[in-house]
Amino acid sequence: ARTTFIRNSTWILIIPLVVSFGVLDWRRGAALIGALLVAAIVALDAWRAKSTSDAATISLMGISSLAIMLVSFVMGPFLIVPALAATNAIFFAMNADAALRRAVLALGVSTIVIPLLLSWAGLDAGYYSFSEGAMVVRSAMVTLPPLMTQLTLTLISILLVITPTLLAGRMRDRLAAAEERVLLQAHYLAQLLPKQGA
């Protein structure tokens, strides 16, 4: 919950940049901004409640997956969304048993597949066109000014490297500290027990 809150808060930082592009469809913009804010609030609530139930985990994963899915409004499901979905799924999978990991995997994949199927079915915008070796990306939500788009994509790409790396490193440090405590407790307990043959 803590790492999800931090990651979702990082995504919220991108909202002013995207809005500065010039919003073409405010319904999409409001849906995306609302989903990102709700995902951060739900993660903060779960962190404060220290809930570890499967239901709480799936709820948190579900709302964060929905927020990621709506990021496809910006540049479709092939740009930005897969990296966000992969990072999100990895963090949830690290704290899930085998059965729960299947749900995590399904939610992660759905963030890419559902927008793509909706686009193919004509129920959402067509984000991509291909011609003579070129792939053209169209946004259904914002204009894409060349310089701002490149700078924003650069910033997002850098954040998608830095944020999970720092959070995963922190989780690894906590795991190492917990393992050290367990080993020390086992050592102290062994000292209290009578030695065999004594």
Image: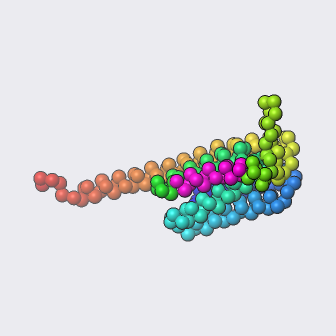
> For the image shown, how many numbered marks are present on the structure?
0
Percent from the top left, x then y, of residue 113?
Answer: 67, 49
Q: In the image, is residue 115 part of the stretch drawn in magenta?
A: yes
* Residue at position x 79%, y 36% in the image: 130
* Residue at position x 69%, y 64% in the image: 38
* Image position of 191 (left or right of 155): left
Question: Quadrant of the image for the N terminus?
Answer: bottom right
* Image position of 181 (left or right of 170): left
Percent from the top left, x then y, of residue 181?
Answer: 39, 55
Is residue 196 placed above or below 54 in the rendered structure?
above
Q: In the image, is residue 49 part of the stretch drawn in magenta?
A: no
Residue segment shown in magenta: 102-117
Main structural element of the magenta stretch: helix, strand or loop? helix
Say which quarter of the image contains residue 64: bottom right
Instruction: Report if residue 4 is visible in the image.
Output: yes
Which residue occupies the extreme bottom position in the image? 49
Instruction: Report if residue 152 is visible in the image.
Output: no
Say which quarter of the image contains residue 7: bottom right
Is residue 20 placed above or below 1 in the rendered structure?
above
Question: Quadrant of the image for the C terminus?
Answer: bottom left
